[in-house]
Amino acid sequence: MTTETTVKPGLQPEDLTKIKFLGDVQISPDASQVFYDVYHINRDKNIYQGEIWQLDLASQKSSRLTAGSRRDSLPRLSPDGTKLAFLSDRAENRKKQIFVLDLGATGEAQQITELQGGVNSLAWSGDSRYLAVLAETPDDTAKAAGWAKPETAEARRKREEAEQEEKRVGGNPVTFNRVKHRADGRRGLVPGDAHVQLWLVDTQDTGVAPKQITRGPFSVATPAFSADGKKLVFSSTRDQKLADFSCTSDLWLIDPFQETAEPRKLTASRGPANHPSFSPDGTKLAYLGHTNPKDGSFNELNRLWVLDLNEQGAAGEARCLTANFEKTVAQFLNSDLRGGSDVDPAWSADSKEVFFGATSDASYQIYRVPADGSAEPRALAGEKAHIYSFSYAAREGIFAFAKSTPLIPGDVFVQAINESNEASRQVTSLNQDWLKGYHLSEPEVVTARSLDDKVDVEGWLIKPPGFDAGSKYPLVLEIHGGPHTAYGYSFYFEFQMLAGQGQVVLYPNPRGSVGYDKYYQTAIHNDWGNHDYNDIMAVVDKVIEQGYIDTARLGVTGGSYGGYMTNWIIGHTDRFKAALTQRCVTNMVTMYTLSDISFGFVESEFEGDIWTNPLIWERSPIAHANKVKTPTLMLHSEADFRCPIEQAEEFYFALKRNGCEVELVRTPDEDHNLSRNGSPDHRIGRLRRIKEWFEKRL
């Protein structure tokens, strides 16, 4: 029996508006200040609104630095600690632009860019004057850059006349010349001559227009300056065939101040290479990646590498510092509060040690490893948690990071790196006051042995308020996406909400999940619907053995691959009374051609292609839809290019054709990440539908 005398209410969908979301965290070089962005939902305007905050670590007091009418994000402190750059969509065109705040003066931040496509990344030069930024190159800039063929006056006249004629009948057609012409998150198509390029912005002389550094029919990612500010390194695939038909990217080095400088390739096109970070002494470059060009880290363990540098560029082969490390050096932990991205490696002040993040045992943690590879990586002290942003003050040996736990949506923590291996300490409390009024359940670990007796399968239970082991409860099974991601020690709003209405929520990590070892991550290669399905059922059965689950009231849900597995489950068992499939995969054959990650994903998950491997169809839920009897609700976004809405339409038609009870909800103007960063109204509407469906059916 519960020891609480008064049972607190559970979370409701509208309570999402009360959360203060913690974004990015940056610590000053002297470790005296931490800068971070906090945002919230403005329900009246149906937008996210946020500010940049400054925390003084000595006094433990926070002060707000910005008060924009929209969302300020991604704070980046200049190396000399005098200026703070950040992104904001408060600009007139609602595109993210760069603003710079002088920390030694009064007044508002100054907008210093007006790039047509907006800005999505920024990095400071060592002298604290310049910013390297990424911005999509508009068509006219691309043509002016010289890689589009010159156009004669007569040809231009004919083209303009033809375009004007076509426009009169409903808009101009768009031409594409590359395979990857759709990108989830853009809510639209990617024109053939639109690419993300690298620009240099002078923060001291703001009258000087940004200078375009890279050119050509390719995109650029993850830029980083050397400590002396004389070199820029970035990730890019400058070969269109590699860009279209592989997951290869290389690191490129360029002098951003030399007018005629050409990038020098540092890596050998063996696989993805990204998130570079220069050592303080400028002699080494750490980066993330692996050596399988056919895999975008789905079935490969992403690793940490170090490349020695000389004045001309690379010297010698890159060294892998995590060759024996059976965890992936990438961010694959799930959350429904935010999207995830990899974090650049950080260096010790003496350039002898590298710090990096890895998904490990249902956590995303910080590890350290000698740069010469003389020892194996070891984790910093701390409980299991989800660290999704970190910054290191190398001279002081202090980390600041954003951390989420099963009971903390996200707060700032700091940790000293010393021989005593101290644990971190929490320095903000963004949501604790209002959350005290609600029932939050600490997840309980449940472990089941796999059907083939090869592995232990880990899962977690969240129990409802006033839980009584002598009573019977409905169970909702939640299945993560990926499949190569993981559930773990993070805050899950949806799970707490469902538990709050009286259901036991179970979320397992079957084989295919990331963070255990390479076998576990790759065990479902060319074998979806086998080990993963049986692992999930083993955990369900283990929970049912406890005696408090009503087996007549089982529900199942999941999104993306979790939607695939929801569809697969109801095509192979009638145990579940209700299913709710979200942004689902149902037909791997059409996924091969229509998804924005298209054939590359399918070919890394299965052997061969849709013409040579019949498993791609046989392991598609649509192939078994004629056996589905479970009442099903389908939620899908119309601008989802990761799992295009055709996936939902095919399964909906198949279930209708075979007489199964099914409903399809299409959400307009949203992409694959509706649950994490969709518009507030649509996001809350989704939670309501989930709550009401299981409340009604279970």
Image (spheres, helix red, strand yellow):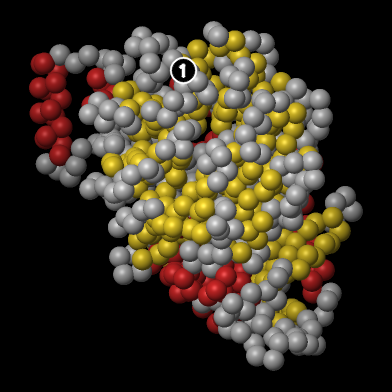
Residue 150 in the image, given as x and y percentages of width and height: 22, 14
| Residue ID at (53%, 71%) | 690
Give the position of the C terminus as an image quadrant: bottom right
Above or below residue 7? Residue 672 is above
Which of 112 and 166 lies nearest the eye of the viewer? 112
Residue 260: quarter of image? top left
Secondary structure state at the residue bearing disc 1: loop
Above or below residue 122? Residue 617 is below
Q: Is residue 663 visible?
A: no
- Crowding at mark 1 (Cα within 10 Å: few <14, some 14-19, many 20+): some
Q: How many marks?
A: 1
| Residue ID at (32%, 55%) | 68
Q: Which residue is at the far right?
A: 453
Q: Is residue 414 visible?
A: yes
The residue labelled by disc 1 is 230
Type of the residue with mark 1: Lys
Above or below residue 528? Residue 276 is above
Q: Which residue is at the far bottom?
A: 5
Above or below residue 82? Residue 192 is above
Q: Is residue 16 left or right of residue 511?
A: left
Which of 504 and 397 lies nearest the eye of the viewer? 397
Q: Is residue 64 left or right of residue 284?
A: left
Residue 379 in the image, given as x and y percentages of width and height: 76, 43
Which of 178 and 118 lies nearest the eye of the viewer? 118
Residue 306 in the image, given as x and y percentages of width and height: 67, 23
Residue 691 in the image, given as x and y percentages of width and height: 53, 75
Give the position of the N terminus as an image quadrant: bottom right
Which of 604 and 449 lies nearest the eye of the viewer? 449
Q: Is residue 244 left or right of residue 267?
A: left
